[in-house]
Amino acid sequence: MSLGTGLGLSRPAATKAVDLRLYGLLDVGVLGGDGAALAALAAEAVAGGVTLLQYREKTIDDARAALARIRAIRAAVAGRVPVLVNDRVDLALAAGAEGVHLGQSDLHSEDARRLLGPRAVIGLTVKNGTQADELYRLPIDYACIGGVFATTSKDNPDPPVGLDGLQRIVFRARLARGQGLPLGAIAGIDASNAASTIRAGADGVALIGALFKGGATEAKARDLRARIDEALAARGA
């Protein structure tokens, strides 16, 4: 029994709908820091069916340069999809971004909500069942579970949870928060395993290299989106 139901505590409803089906992460460490190039990738991804974008720069030495890149990305997508900023609430505020994605050691989601307000999109990384159990009390709009598979895009000290682990964490997240909170999956996901990740319970997938590296971003996005939508339909989601 989850604390959210067992103790009669109210679940914080998601404040807005977030479409996680195809979540593109524009990671400076993987893709480089050319703002114009990142903006072009963002525009191609949205044209191909990406539903959500995130600017990710794990080590920011030049906040002004990062801010300029975020603004360029937002200008390129022109409000067609939300643009979130990884970790940095201050940069999200300065850029007028639609929200943030937080890790377990970043600013607490309650503090981020106070700073960003009720209309902002706030997402959270969830790595295990214990963290999923805590979702009942957090003012977030979605959670991303991972890493699901091995990846080279991020130094992750935790072993991949795999599809079985993803299923277990999804179960506990649903138990804690109900069906209303979108749940994404992240790490090592590509065209070969996106559908199986959806079948395991994710509402969407987050990608970097499989979407943005090697060119043809729009075509890759269209292919991934078709696979995801087909898997969701088969699941009845």
Image (cartoon, rainbow, N blue to C red):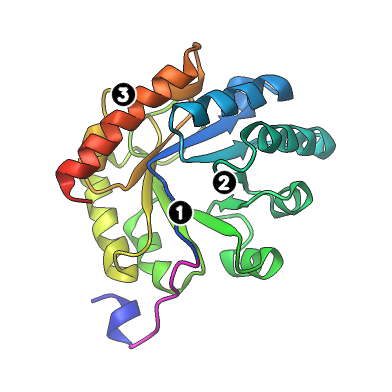
Seen in the picture, residue 213 relative to 229 is either above or below; the reply is above
Identify the amino acid type marked 3: Ala
Residue position for label 3: 191
Q: CA distance from mark 2 to mark 3?
A: 23 Å
Q: Are marks 1 and 3 in contact (CB under 8 Å)?
A: no
x 69%, y 54%: residue: 89
Residue 83, given in percent of the width and then of the height, sits at 60, 43
Specify the farthest residue to the bottom. Answer: 8
Q: Nearer the viewer, mark 2 or mark 3?
A: 2
SS of the residue at dot 2?
Answer: loop
Query: Does residue 132 show up magenta in the picture?
Result: no
Q: Position of residue 152 (x, y in %)?
A: 46, 24
The secondary structure that most of the magenta stretch takes on is loop
Residue ID for mark 1 = 18
Identify the magenta region.
8-15
State the image quarter where residue 198 is shown.
top left
| SS state under label 1 | loop
Circle number at residue 220: none
Mark 1 nearby-residue class (10 Å; few <14, some 14–19, many ≥20): some
| Number of the label disc, if any, that sits on residue 82 | 2
Front one among 209 and 97? 97
Kind of residue at disc 2: Pro
Amino acid carrying mark 1 in the image: Val
Query: Of the residues under marks 2 and 3, which one precedes in the sequence?
Result: 2
